[in-house]
C-alpha cells in the first residue's frame, strides 16, 4: 500500500457518520473544466447556462437524493450485510479466516478478484501496523479503502469537461452496448442540464434501432430540448456532423447530447463505425466531443469490465454512467471498473424517474453499501 493511501486512512479523511450524511450531501458539487483544463463559464445561450448555475444545481443534493441511492443499492447492500456478522466475531488470531470470509462476501457482489484482493491486502497491512484492532476499525478502514479507489484511481468524478469557447457548445457523446439504457439516460441527462439553465440539442445517432429517434423525441419533448435535423437514410457519422454544424450555426445551444447505436464491444465492424462517428464530430469541430460517456448496465456485473476495456481503448472514454443499479446485487463491479480502468463514474441510475439519475458521490455510494449500524437499513 502506498504512503498516500496509508496517510488518507490514518488521518481518517473520510467520515461515514450517518448523522452527518445530510451535511456531506449538501457539500457535493460539480466542477467544470475546459478541454485545456481551465475553469470556465460555459457557453451561455438563451437559458443562461453557466458554471455557477451548474454548481448550484448540484449543491442542492438533499437527504431525498441519498435516500434514492440507499433504495437503489438495496440488493447489493443485502448481500454485503453478511460482513457485519463476520466482523462481529472479530479476533486478531483468526485474521486469515476473517479475510477469507470478507473476500468471499466482496466477490458475491462482483467486486472482482483483483480489486477484492487489493482491498484486503490494505486491511492486512493496517492490522499488521496496529491500525486495526476491532471489527469496527476493520469496517471503517474497508470503506475508506474503497472510497480511495473510487477517488484516487478514478480521478475526481465531479469534474466535467466543457467547451472553453463561448461560441462552441459542449458536446457529450453517449456510447454503450445494446439495451444498456443509453437513450433513456440521454433524456435524464437533458433534464439535469435543463435544471442548470442549458439549452440542449439531442442528436438521434442511433440509426439502427427501430423507433430510436421517436423515443429520443419523446424525451426531448419532456425536457424542453430540441432535436437536430436528421434526414432519413443518413449514416450515423453524417447525422452527428450535421448536428454539430446545426448547433454551432444556431448560436444558442449550450449542450449537444449525441446518441449512438448500441453495439457489442466484440463486433469490430460496429466498433469501427462508432470510431467513425467520433471522427466525424471532431472533423466538424476539433475540440469535440468534450465528454465520451460510457453507459454500463449494472445488472451485467463484472461483464461490464470487458465492455469498459474495449470502449475505452477505441473511444477514449472520459466517464461512466452506471444504470439499472436498483435491479442488481452486483453493484461491486463498478469499483472493479474504476480500479482497473482509472475512469471515474460520473452518474448512477437508481430508478425509473428523471430524478433517479444521480451525480455519483463516492462517499455516499460506499456509505449506502456499508451503512453504520446505528443507521440500520436507512
Image (tube, helix red, strand yellow):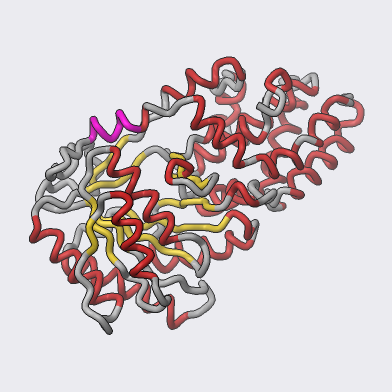
Q: Is residue 40 left or right of residue 157?
A: left
In depth, the one of 76 and 41 nearer the eye is 76
Magenta span: chief secondary structure? helix
| Quadrant placement of the C terminus | top right
The residue lying at 69 percent from left, 35 percent from top is: 122
- Residue 227 % position (x, y): 24, 62
102 relative to 15 in the view: left or right:
right
Depicted 360 relative to depicted 173: above or below: above
Would residue 108 appear left or right of 21 to someone viewing this image?
right
- Residue at point 47%, 80% (across, down): 268
Rendered location of residue 283, percent (x, y):
19, 70
Q: Is residue 333 visible?
A: yes
Closest to the observer: 228 or 312?
Answer: 228
Query: What are the residue bounds of the magenta stretch?
Result: 51-57
**Position of the N terminus by quadrant:** top right
| Residue located farthest toward the top when viewing the structure as drawn | 19
Q: Nearer the viewer, residue 22 or 139?
A: 22
Question: Quick check: 146 left or right of 86?
Answer: left
Amino acid at each position: 500500500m502506498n504512503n498516500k493511501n496509508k496517510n488518507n486512512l490514518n488521518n481518517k479523511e473520510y467520515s461515514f457518520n450517518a448523522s452527518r450524511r445530510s451535511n456531506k450531501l449538501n457539500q457535493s458539487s460539480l466542477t467544470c473544466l475546459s478541454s485545456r483544463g481551465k475553469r470556465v463559464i460555459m457557453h451561455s445561450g438563451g437559458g443562461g447556462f453557466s458554471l455557477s448555475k451548474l454548481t448550484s444545481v448540484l449543491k442542492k443534493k438533499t437527504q431525498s437524493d441519498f435516500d434514492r441511492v440507499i433504495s437503489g443499492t438495496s440488493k447489493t447492500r443485502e448481500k454485503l450485510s453478511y460482513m457485519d456478522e463476520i466482523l462481529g466475531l472479530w479476533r486478531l488470531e483468526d485474521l486469515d479466516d476473517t479475510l477469507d470470509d470478507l473476500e468471499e462476501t466482496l466477490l458475491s457482489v462482483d467486486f472482482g478478484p483483483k480489486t477484492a484482493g487489493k482491498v484486503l491486502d490494505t486491511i492486512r497491512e493496517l492490522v499488521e501496523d496496529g491500525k486495526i484492532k476491532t471489527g469496527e476499525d476493520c469496517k471503517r478502514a474497508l470503506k475508506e479503502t474503497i472510497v480511495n479507489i473510487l477517488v484516487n484511481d478514478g480521478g475526481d468524478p465531479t469534474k466535467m469537461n466543457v467547451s472553453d469557447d463561448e461560441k462552441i457548445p459542449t458536446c457529450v457523446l453517449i456510447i454503450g452496448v445494446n439495451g444498456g439504457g443509453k437513450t433513456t439516460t440521454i433524456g435524464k441527462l437533458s433534464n439535469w442540464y435543463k435544471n442548470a439553465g442549458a439549452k440542449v440539442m439531442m442528436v438521434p445517432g442511433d440509426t439502427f434501432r427501430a423507433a430510436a429517434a421517436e423515443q429520443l423525441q419523446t424525451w426531448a419533448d419532456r425536457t424542453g430540448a430540441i432535436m437536430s435535423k436528421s434526414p432519413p437514410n443518413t449514416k450515423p457519422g453524417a447525422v452527428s456532423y450535421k448536428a454539430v454544424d446545426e448547433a454551432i450555426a444556431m448560436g444558442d445551444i449550450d449542450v449537444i447530447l449525441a446518441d449512438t447505436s448500441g453495439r457489442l464491444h466484440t463486433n469490430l465492424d460496429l466498433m469501427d463505425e462508432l470510431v467513425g462517428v467520433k471522427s466525424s464530430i471532431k472533423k466538424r469541430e476539433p475540440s469535440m466531443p468534450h465528454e465520451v460517456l460510457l453507459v454500463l448496465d449494472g445488472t451485467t456485473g463484472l461483464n461490464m469490465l470487458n465492455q469498459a476495456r474495449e470502449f475505452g481503448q477505441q473511444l477514449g472514454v472520459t466517464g461512466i454512467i452506471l444504470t439499472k443499479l436498483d435491479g442488481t446485487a452486483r453493484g461491486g463491479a463498478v469499483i472493479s471498473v474504476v480500479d482497473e480502468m482509472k475512469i471515474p463514474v460520473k452518474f448512477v441510475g437508481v430508478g425509473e424517474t428523471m430524478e433517479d439519475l444521480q451525480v455519483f458521490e463516492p462517499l455516499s455510494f460506499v456509505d449506502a453499501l456499508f451503512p453504520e449500524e446505528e443507521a440500520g437499513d436507512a
